[in-house]
Image (cartoon, coloured by chain):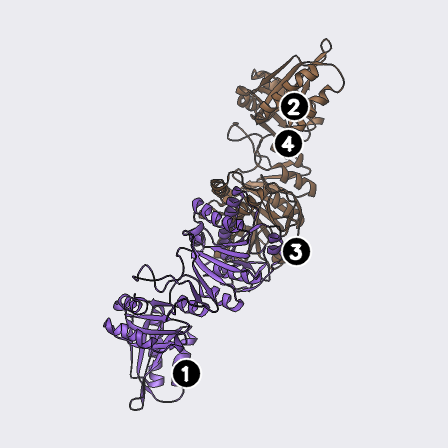
Chain colours: A purple, B brown
């Protein structure tokens, strides 16, 4: 089998951890597999480099920032290669430009366009372990780019796709994907498998295991992902297109998001095009809107409520107040003491009673629901922030208890 | 004019120094010149990276070491570029592979083969200051190489040669090339100019201003070098083919070398081929021999004395003792309490009395001469190590006093 393994920055933070990672790689190689390893920069390296830059220029060009930051992964690949040399295994490290990781020119947030897999294949044909610098590529000018947040996960998936790898293993600090945050929710269960879509919903809802970009790419190219621990040698969670569940689990996971605030405008005239004007103004200001709720008409006027990220609350409120006169609202009210709780499950739409079960759990916990939003694989509710942990636990107990 | 400027690691060691270097570059650019800057890794970066590597593998492959070490210069170029961006100047940083600095495959000690000047020219045509990572290149496999000791100086000279630059300025901790080490010798004078050959002799004799490789390359391609200070804004020392001296200086400089030991073999049979056998054995063991002295024949036997680097003394002595029986010496004696003092000057061979003046100075200082060696532009003497500083001062006074 051809296996791509990705290790994050904390997994290679010091010499001991580098040796541990080398041990995992060596075991995989010794089982007869072809192995490509994708690495992030060691521990705090990226932060240290950013601090160095800002000491000289608090607003450097993104191009030069990428030249600087890409050294972090290059250090990691050399060190892990040296650790494998020490064990006596054939190994070679390669940078982003050496594997021809072609990206567009958005320095600091580049998108992968193509990978020239020739060099990778040539090294694998020599039965070498190939250690690749994640997070980095080159654009059409042969300038260094970085992929931005979640970049190394995305590099790993892109390489796995280019090489048609049998598996792409993402090693992290946790043992896999859980039904809820195991540090917060009693009884949280590790999932053996989860679909891409479920993973996408969970990631966007704040389960910070895999970055959405990498999951989207894995889904597009059918890359079999596995999330597992750098520290505990046991199977993690597989992420793939279709998951056959051993037991019929009703949902895959529960996530919460405290970074949310709600805005309500009251007394909106019941005329065509009003909603369009409201949300076009927000889109122009690049403010993402999540849940939207429009109340039933009352006396020729509507109420519109929606949620935004807490950081966008002030800007969104200003925009609404500016629109008050031109559109003719009565009132704009805001609430930043809310939180969102969501349940995710691929089979949700066909399984009746899932929503009822969730609402029952909240009722039992005496948690009031302010807004509701549903999709094919997700139900989200907006509640008071102070009740969020109790709500998650109550829902978890309802679905996974006993 | 097109000027190449090279700054060493101590010149870019921290944010303040990076800003100072940026100031020098900005001034040169503002005078209307095209500027290419070549940088070394910051301060202790290279040592820190080597320590990181050795913590994991005390004997890593040279290939992976080069992947690791080349990050040091890449950090420097990004930071200096950012400092110039901060002043508002157009600037771009380029790595060794981006300027197609082609080398052979001797990782850790690669030789430059060719520079693809296209990218450099394209950026200069845009009136950009170009900041290049010194010390690094790529081989025919597109793998990263480093040039070894003196590598950044050599990079700068190679780039100056490829671009037919008008001047290659090497910025250092000292203000130029002196008649003797200014920290040790009272009255040491800064030279306005010196020939390539004189500089080569001084460099090989331990005046650690410019590495020999860079001077040899400058001589071969006729690159006008200038050695000057990163800290004091005044002219340094020019290194070129022919130097018109304002005053007729008899010699250019005095150098000492404490890293030397002498070996004498006594009672060597006076037969053809004996010297050949002795020095072939040393050459096989890659031991460099410097001064060689063969005494006049006495009763059918000679004495042969020669000097080697202190580090090679034990190995060289073993080789001589092995040869004792086969060749038939009487005795091998060693002395590692010696030092070499040399005077260098391009016009030496034609100026009679230079040697006499040197020997007179040593006689005045009551320093005994053990061996003498001369070349077209150099006279070296071997003396007791304990007298070396007094000898250099006495010679300096004789040639440069008043």
Above or below, comparing residue B248 to residue B83 in the picture? above
- Label whose residue precedes the other's in the sequence (4 or 3): 3
Same chain, labels 4 and 2: yes
Res B239 quadrant in image: top right
Callout 1: chain? A
Distance Cα–Cα, label 4 vs label 2: 14 Å
Are both tags, 3 and 2, on one chain? yes
Where is mark 1, residue-wise?
Answer: A276
B255, A31: nearer the viewer: A31
Mark 1–mark 2 CB contact (< 8 Å): no
Query: Which type of secondary structure does the marked residue at label 1 adopt?
Result: helix
Viewport quadrant of the C terminus of chain A: bottom left
Camera-near label (3 vs 1) is: 1
Measured as percent of width and height from the top left, residue B183 is found at: 50, 30
In terms of sequence position, does the residue under pointer 4 or pointer 2 come before the other? 4
Residue identified by numbered label 4: B201
Which residue in the protein does label 3 denote?
Answer: B118
Q: Which residue is mark 2?
A: B291
- Foreground pick, B114 / A90: A90
Q: Where residue B273 sits in the image (x, y, percent)?
A: 75, 20
Q: Quadrant of residue B305?
A: top right
**In 3D space, how far apart are the residues under numbered discs 3 and 2 (Cα atoms)?**
46 Å
Chain to which mark 2 belongs? B
């Amino acid at each position: 089998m051809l296996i791509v393994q990705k290790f994050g920055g904390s997994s290679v933070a010091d010499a001991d951890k580098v040796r541990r990672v080398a041990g995992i790689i060596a075991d995989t190689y010794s089982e007869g597999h072809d192995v490509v390893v994708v690495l992030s920069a060691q521990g705090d390296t990226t932060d240290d480099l950013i601090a160095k830059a800002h000491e000289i220029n608090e607003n450097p060009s993104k191009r030069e920032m990428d030249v600087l930051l890409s050294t972090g992964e290059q250090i990691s690949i050399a060190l892990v290669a040296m650790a494998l040399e020490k064990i006596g295994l054939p190994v070679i490290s390669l940078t982003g430009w050496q594997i021809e990781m072609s990206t567009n020119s958005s320095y600091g947030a580049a998108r992968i366009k193509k990978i020239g897999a020739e060099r990778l294949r040539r090294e694998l044909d020599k039965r070498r372990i190939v250690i690749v610098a994640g997070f980095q590529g080159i654009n059409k000018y042969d300038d260094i780019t970085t992929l931005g947040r979640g970049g190394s996960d995305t590099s790993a998936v892109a390489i796995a796709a280019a090489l048609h790898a049998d598996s792409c293993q993402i090693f992290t600090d946790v043992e896999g994907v859980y039904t809820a945050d195991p540090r917060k929710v009693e009884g949280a269960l590790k999932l053996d498998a989860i679909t891409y879509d479920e993973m996408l919903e969970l990631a966007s809802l704040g389960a910070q295991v895999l970055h959405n970009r990498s999951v989207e790419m894995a889904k597009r190219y059918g890359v079999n992902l596995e999330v597992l621990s750098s520290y505990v040698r046991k199977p993690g969670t597989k992420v793939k297109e279709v998951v056959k569940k051993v037991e019929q689990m009703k949902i895959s996971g529960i996530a919460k998001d405290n970074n949310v605030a709600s805005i309500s405008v009251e007394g909106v005239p019941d005329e065509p095009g009003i909603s369009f004007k409201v949300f076009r103004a927000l889109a122009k200001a690049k403010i993402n809107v999540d849940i939207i709720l429009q109340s039933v008409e009352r006396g020729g006027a509507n109420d519109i409520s929606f949620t935004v990220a807490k950081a966008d609350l002030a800007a969104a409120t200003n925009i609404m107040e500016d629109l008050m006169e031109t559109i003719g609202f009565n009132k704009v009210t805001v609430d930043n003491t809310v939180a969102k709780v969501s349940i995710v499950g691929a089979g949700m739409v066909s399984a009746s009673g899932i929503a009822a079960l969730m609402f029952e759990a909240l009722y039992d916990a005496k948690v009031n629901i302010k807004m509701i939003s549903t999709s094919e694989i997700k139900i989200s509710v907006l509640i008071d922030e102070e009740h969020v942990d109790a709500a998650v636990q109550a829902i978890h107990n309802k679905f996974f208890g006993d």
